[in-house]
Image (spheres, rainbow, N blue to C red):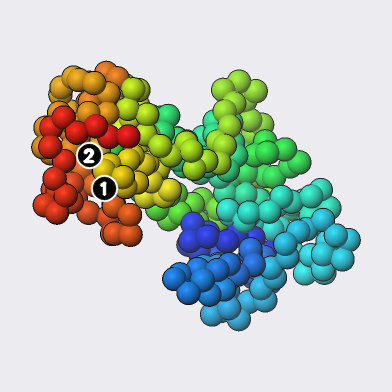
Amino acid sequence: MRLIFMGTPAFAVPTLEALIASPHEVVAVYTQPPRPAGRGQKLTPSPVHQLAERHGIPVLTPTSLKSAETQKAFRAHRADAAIVAAYGLLLPRPILEACPYGCINIHPSDLPRWRGAAPLQRTIMAGDTHSALCIMQMDDGLDTGDVLLRAPFTIPDGMTAGALHDYAATASPPLLLQALEAVAAGKARPVKQATEGVTYAAKISKEEAAIDWTRPATEVRQHILGLSPFPGATFDLAGERWKALSAELAEGNGAAGVALDDALTIACGESAVRLLTVQRPGKAAMSAAEALRGHLVPAGTRLG
């Protein structure tokens, strides 16, 4: 099949690599424009952009797909289908209908649960124990299209959003190739999404990252795991904004947000959590023991 690939971040890279190595032909790559990155804020192409250039695939970086000119250029690729993986732009109807087999999306949640921008983080933050990878035929709605292939999996206790991201990124390509084989052979059996159990994975706001110590310890822990490594669950300590990147449940009770010992065991609304990995402003992530060697947090310290 002649394919257009539409993706931007590292999550999409393994899928593009798999398509390049497959019998399919990637005739064009659409990705977000270069963004400032690093200390020098130098304009840097996306991970997908860089991979496509290394393989000599034409790269396009429109800021919108709404203009007639952009849509005409899209159709001119004469692609059989467009593959979408964390692209970052809305696809208007003329784009959705430009290819004979439409636009096929990789979505890392058990649709219709966690439609939207942040399914990986929301899955962990909610404490879900099961999820799925879905290969979906896109339509006009927000992740509402028919599912071509669904691969359920169990979420291990203690998994972070970062670990879930890495799993989904590496497990998705073979599922996509399987779905494409079925589509090309006319054997695909699209399944409509259930109308019950719909939830939305809204983008994580900066304010939402702050830890609410008055919540039960189980919820505080999932909040920390769900925002690790990015953007990181935050708390204030001695005038600094720290990040908590991993934690475990611990025994103990006390005033919410107060350290119960000298090892970063923090009381919550119910029970307590022990912080395992933290990050101070301008520093690399480190174990709690490492952080405490240079910055003591004695019992009774209140975290903001």
Calculate the distance from the C-alpha at mark 1 to the C-alpha at mark 2: 7 Å
Q: Quadrant of residue 66?
A: bottom right
Quadrant where the N terminus lies? bottom right
Q: Which residue is mark 2?
A: 275
Q: Nearer the viewer, residue 129 or 258?
A: 258
Residue at (66% x, 73% y) in the render: 59
Mark number displayed over residue 278? 1
Quadrant where the C terminus lies? top left
Could you tell me which secondary element the residue under label 2 belongs to? strand
Q: Nearer the viewer, residue 300 or 179?
A: 300
Kind of residue at badge 2 = Leu
Is residue 64 visible in the rendered structure shown here? yes
Residue at (18% x, 19% y) in the render: 253
Q: Nearer the viewer, residue 191 or 233?
A: 233
Mark number displayed over residue 194? none
Dots 1, 2 in contact, CB < 8 A: yes
